[in-house]
Image (tube, rainbow, N blue to C red):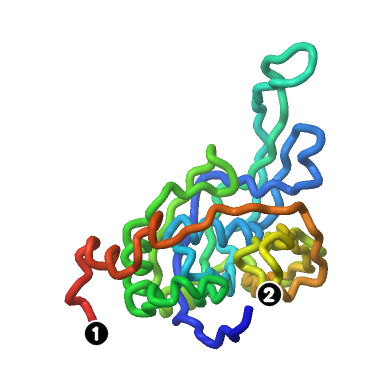
Amino acid sequence: MGETNHFQSKPFYYRLYGDYALFTDPVTKGGGEKFTYQIPTYQAIKGITEQIYWKPTIYIVIDELVVMNRIVTETMGARPIITTGKKPGNDLSNYTYLSDVDYLIKFHFEWNLNRPDLAKDRNEFKHQAIILRSLERGGRRSIFLGTSECMGFVERLSEKDYYETARESYYRESNVSYGIMFHSFTYPDEQLGNEAEEDLKLYSNYTPIQMKKGKISFCRPEDCQMQQVVNDYHFKTFNEGNMTLVDEEYQAMGLEGTEQ
């Protein structure tokens, strides 16, 4: 990336909760039975935040996660459809979910400098206003807690509400180390470099995760201790021909005239 990203939006806050969640530990996938991580990954929270609002113009950065409820798992029987092998049909597997999850999230956005063609879409106030409106409405798309059978719900929080509620975390007096965990993926259009398009790859990032007094402060994907090439990756390109610019969307949402 030729220019340095000095822009950072103001922080946003929201509550994320649901009856069940399944943030699958990839180590457990091979046997067909899924077991959840004890906490959501950075990538899971980023994906949920992008369901609230996302455009290729911006780059979502997750700053903090607060675990409000006691971490409890529940195992359920599932009958996934088997489409391979000699006898396709249903199989019986055990999936282990988190139950009664409740998190507080703090995030901000930056400009995606890999998209200089969208420079005119960089209107901080309008992106901010749409994010706040989307948070008030519980997101723009369905919220899933790791998998589609686990519905999630979103509530906008003020900065004051965020910090006051965080003091009530079940783990407010505990420090827990989760060791090295999967952190995130780095997609080609998010890579901080000048690689040729044919050299761009998908990376998976791993780093030690620690919860201090109920709060997990995430490092950025590029600061993770371990990085692994997953595969060559070709991604859909968004441009003015197949996306709505923020000016048009801002007007369509009836936010014109709300400037402060």
Q: Look at label 2 and name its amino acid.
A: Asn
On the question of residue 105 being in view, the answer is yes
Element on which disc 1 rests: loop
Most extreme residue toward the top, as rendered?
A: 87
Q: Look at label 1 and name its amino acid.
A: Gln
Q: Position of residue 3 (x, y in %)?
A: 59, 85
Quadrant of res 244: bottom left
Please give the name of the residue rendered at 69% of the width and 46% of the height, measured from the top-left corner: 24
Q: Which mark is residue 194?
A: 2
Answer left or right for 60 relative to 36: left
On the question of residue 158 being in view, the answer is no
Please give the name of the residue rendered at 72% of the width and 39% of the height, measured from the top-left corner: 34
Element on which disc 2 rests: loop
Q: Earlier in the sequence, mark 2 or mark 1?
A: 2
Mark 2 Cα-neighbour bin, 10 Å: few <14, some 14–19, many ≥20: few
Gap between marks 2 and 1, in whole Å?
38 Å
Which sits in the foreground, 6 or 73? Answer: 6
Mark 1 Cα-neighbour bin, 10 Å: few <14, some 14–19, many ≥20: few
Please give the name of the residue rendered at 20% of the width and 65% of the height, measured from the top-left corner: 254
Residue topped by disc 1: 260
Q: Position of residue 33 (x, y in %)?
A: 75, 34
Which sits in the foreground, 167 or 121? Answer: 121
Q: Position of residue 23 (x, y in %)?
A: 65, 49
Q: Position of residue 200 (x, y in %)?
A: 71, 62
Answer left or right for 255 relative to 164: left
Quadrant of res 222: bottom right
Answer left or right for 139 relative to 218: left
